[in-house]
Amino acid sequence: MSPTESSREENVYMAKLAEQAERYEEMVEFMEKVAKADDSTGILLSLRLVLRGRKLLRAHCWLTSLLRILLLLNWLQLTQ
């Protein structure tokens, strides 16, 4: 494995950890490093990152909506 591949894998790993910790800004920073390092691979990598980003954004929005619903239900239960 070349040094470039190892740093790429490290950045992907760190991005996944940041995602699990809900540190989305850090996750984006690590994925930007991956994209810049893999610039030579072109459009295919960009497409993969866009699709992954959409999935992450969708999951984040879904979790945020779920949290709001749970908070609303909790508030309604407390007011009754």
Image (cartoon, grey):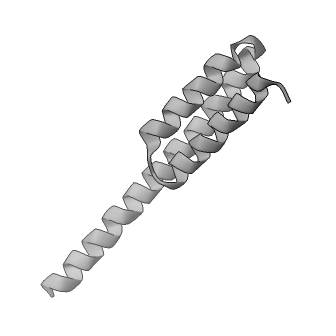
Residue plotted at (75% across, 32% down): 6
The answer to whether residue 5 is above or below residue 78 is above
Q: Is residue 65 left or right of residue 42?
A: left
Instruction: Give the x, y percent position of residue 47.
Output: 68, 25
Residue plotted at (26% across, 70% down): 72
Instruction: Give the x, y percent position of residue 56.
Output: 55, 44
The answer to whether residue 41 is above or below residue 72 is above
Q: Residue furthest bottom?
A: 80
Residue plotted at (44% across, 58% down): 63
The answer to whether residue 59 is above or below residue 30 is below
Which of 57/7 is in front? 7
Instruction: Give the x, y percent position of residue 10.
Output: 67, 37
Which of 66/28 is in front? 28
Which of 20/49 is in front? 20
Q: In which quarter of the image is residue 52?
A: top right
Figure quadrant of the C terminus: bottom left
Q: Quadrant of residue 53?
A: top right
Residue plotted at (86% across, 30% down): 1
Q: Is residue 7 left or right of residue 68?
A: right
Instruction: Give the x, y percent position of residue 21.
Output: 48, 54
